[in-house]
Image (cartoon, rainbow, N blue to C red):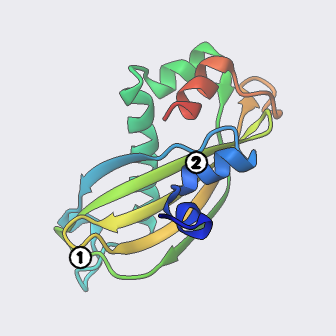
Amino acid sequence: MFETKDLAANIPKVVQKAVEGRLESCLMFERRFQTYWSDADNAGIVFFPHFFRFFEQAEEELFRSAGKNRQELLQANQVWMPRVEVFTKFSKPVRNGDAIRVRLTPQIKGEKTVRYDFEIIDDRSNDKVADGYVTVVCVDAERFKATPIPDAIRNIIQNA
C-alpha cells in the first residue's frame, strides 16, 4: 500500500503543476541533436552560445511537429516573438561530437508571454549538462507592442 507522500513523489511534475493550477501548459517536448566541430572551442568543448541555438532549434521543431512552419505562422498572424530574458546554468561540459537532447517545457504566462524552461541532457550518459529558461513576449509586428498570443500559436505551444 502506498502512503500519501509516496503517491505525491510518483506524480510527474507536469501533473502536479497542472493540478496546482499554476500553468496553462506544462508538457515537455524533446529533440535530439548532434554536436559538431564547428560548435566547439579550442578545448573541444561546445561553446556556450551554441546552447541557445540548440534551444532555438528545439523550439522550431516543436512547431514542425505540429505540422506548422513557425515563421509562416508568425507572418500570417502579424506578430513576432522576441526573447526578453534568458538564463542558463551549465553543469557539465559537452564535447565536440557528443549527442544531446533538448527538453522544452513551455509555460504560457498570461495572454502575451511564454516561458520555455529547458534542460540539455547528454544522450549517452543521461546526465543533465545545462538547464535554464527563455522568456518570449508576443508583439504586434507593425508597432512592436505586446499583444495577446494568437490562438493558432498558443494551441501549438500548449499541446507540445
Q: Residue at x 31, y 57 (%)?
A: 101
Residue 155 is at least partly visible in this image: yes
Residue 136 is at least partly visible in this image: no
Q: List x then y, in percent, for residue 2.
A: 50, 64
Mark number, residue 21:
none
Q: Residue at x 80, y 28 (%)?
A: 147
* Relative side of 45 to 79, left or right: left
Q: Of circles 1 and 2, which is in front?
A: 2
Query: Quick check: 128 above or below 93?
Result: above
Q: Residue at x 76, y 23 (%)?
A: 142
Which residue is the extreme one toward the top?
76
Which residue is the extreme one toward the bottom?
43
According to the image, label 2 marks what residue? 15
Q: Could you say which is closer to the camera, residue 132 or residue 52?
A: 132
Secondary structure under tag 1 reads: loop
Q: List x then y, in percent, for residue 89.
A: 53, 76
Q: List x then y, in percent, for residue 115.
A: 65, 49
Q: Amino acid at mark 1?
A: Arg
According to the image, label 1 marks what residue? 95
Q: Amino acid at mark 2?
A: Val
Which residue is the extreme one toward the front?
1
